[in-house]
Amino acid sequence: MSEPEIPEALASYLATRDSQRAQAVRDFLALLTDRERGLVRDFAVMGYVHGRMHPEGEPHPKDSHVLATVTEACLHHRDLYPAVSAVASAATA
């Protein structure tokens, strides 16, 4: 069975919206300091990793639990998450 063709106007619209969303992300990240951008990156990557590991069909935990789990994982893997590690190291110095 063949896939239905996407009309050119719709394909063009979708490509334009993808480009606009990507630019909005770049614009937002440009507003952040290097430190803020590093923290966002570290937490986002670890959150993504934990999300990919979450068992399918299982309920998702509350935000506070996710934040604690992701923070603990970033602190545990300090070499992979340098922005979080730098904040933690500065706090204990």
Image: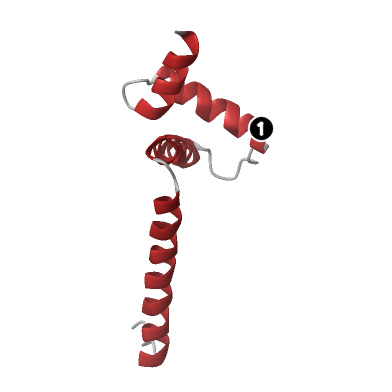
Q: How many marks?
A: 1
Q: Which residue is mark 1?
A: 64
Observer-nearest of 35 and 13: 35
Where is residue 10? Give x, y as percent: 42, 87
- For the residue marked with disc 1, what is the amino acid? Ser
What residue is drawn where x is 45% and y is 20%?
75
Observer-nearest of 33 and 66: 33
- Give the side of residue 60 with respect to residue 3, left or right: right
Within 10 Å of disc 1 (Cα), the crowding (few <14, some 14-19, many 20+) is few
Quadrant of the rendered image containing residue 93: top left
What residue is drawn where x is 46% and y is 18%?
88
What residue is drawn where x is 39% and y is 52%?
30
Which quadrant does the N terminus fall into?
A: bottom left
User: Dot 1 lies on which element?
Assistant: helix
- Give the side of residue 54 with respect to residue 4, left or right: right
Where is residue 90? Give x, y as percent: 44, 15
Where is residue 18? Give x, y as percent: 40, 71
Whether residue 9 is situated above or below residue 24 in the rendered picture: below
Residue 81 visible here? no
Whether residue 33 is situated above or below residue 6 in the rendered picture: above
